[in-house]
Image (spheres, rainbow, N blue to C red):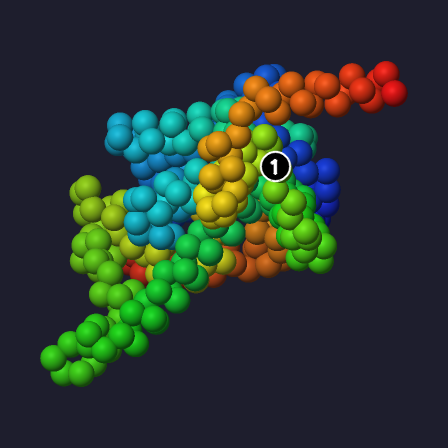
Amino acid sequence: MGTVTPSYCEGLALSAPKDETRRELNRFLADVERKAYRMARIALRHDDDALDAVQDAMLQLARRYAARPSAEWRPLFYRILENRIRDLQRRRMVRGKVMALLPWRRDEDGEARDPVAEAPDHGPGPADQVEGQNVMAALEAALAKLPGRQREAFLLRSMEGLDVAATAAAMGCSDGSVKTHYFRAVQALKAQLGEFWT
Amino acid sequence: MNTDHEPGEFERRTAALLRDSAENLDGATRARLTRARAAALEPANRARSWLDFRYLAPAGAMAAAVLATVLIVGPGEHVAPVNDATNSALFDMDLLADADAFEIAQETDLEFIEWAAAQGELDGAGG
């Protein structure tokens, strides 16, 4: 299967889906919503932002692409979701830069405070968390440190179980790029989580 | 499915962990996701579509056209409607302003005037 071209932009059905389509769409969204939320949560490290991203992706899929063949929904949905995640990350970055420029945001030493750097770190470093119930937190922290495209490729392939072609469609890149991103993600995660993880 | 790559132990383990974490979300988050899904599929949400640009654009164009018409044509001559009550009021004002006319009006025998007017009409018709 090749990559999905931007042809999905054709024939946008800016309306609510019909009953049968709605039932099918409901089943599809019910199947992906939790995984999508986890992906968004790992990328954004914020519950409400993650939920907003998933809800926006659901709305866009239902409003714009419900008329597309259901086989295309999954890569489309994740593509919309990733775009939304990137939008939120960009917005957060801009907000952080603006806030850093404000004079009353400087600390006693006159250093500009970086809201992103000051964001709460969910627990200790990855290597210290690979025991008991902290295993998931360690994995999540390690994933959050990956470059966005590597994280995206890894999560789509490992958690969602998409093959290379579907992952490429969701990411809007070539199969080769997916393989590269995925390989690098695995290597980086192994390095972060330590040898005893395997 | 991963048809073109055989995942190693590390990948299998991380994949299982991630799927478990997705399946075991807390109830509040699951409920919010369910509500979000229902909202996405709800046809009633189309009620918001009146705010869409495709509706606002023609409305804005219409408003601009009306405004342009008013500005170009201008307000024009305004002719106020005049009714009997207005005429009567104006007559009374003239009468009050003119002292002589007021006195004449007070002394006039209206019955005589009406009789004279009737006679005039009869003469006209007969003559």
Q: Answer above or below: position of A168 versus B16.
A: below
Task: Inspect this view and state whether residue A82 appears.
Answer: no
Q: Secondary structure at mark 1?
A: loop
Identified at 62% across, 37% down, the residue is: B81
Residue A104 picture location, percent across and down: 19, 74
Identified at 32% across, 37% down, the residue is: B21
Q: Answer above or below: position of A33 versus B75.
A: above
A161 vs A102, left or right, is right
Quarter of the picture containing the N terminus of chain A is top right
Identified at 72% across, 45% down, the residue is: A7
Q: Answer above or below: position of A89 versus A112.
A: above
Q: How many marks?
A: 1
Residue type, numbered disc 1: Val
A152 vs A43, left or right, is right
As drawn, the residue found furthest toward the bottom would be: A110
Task: Tell me the crowding category of disc 1: few under 14, some 14 to 19, or many 20 or more residues within 10 angstroms, Cα based.
Answer: few
Task: Between residue A153 and residue A86, name the one nearer to us.
Answer: A86
As drawn, the residue found furthest toward the right would be: B127
Task: Inspect this view and state whether residue A95 appears.
Answer: yes
Q: Chain letter for mark 1, please.
A: B
Task: Between residue A57 and residue B3, name the one nearer to us.
Answer: A57
Residue A72 picture location, percent across and down: 64, 36
Name the residue beneath numbered marker 1. B82
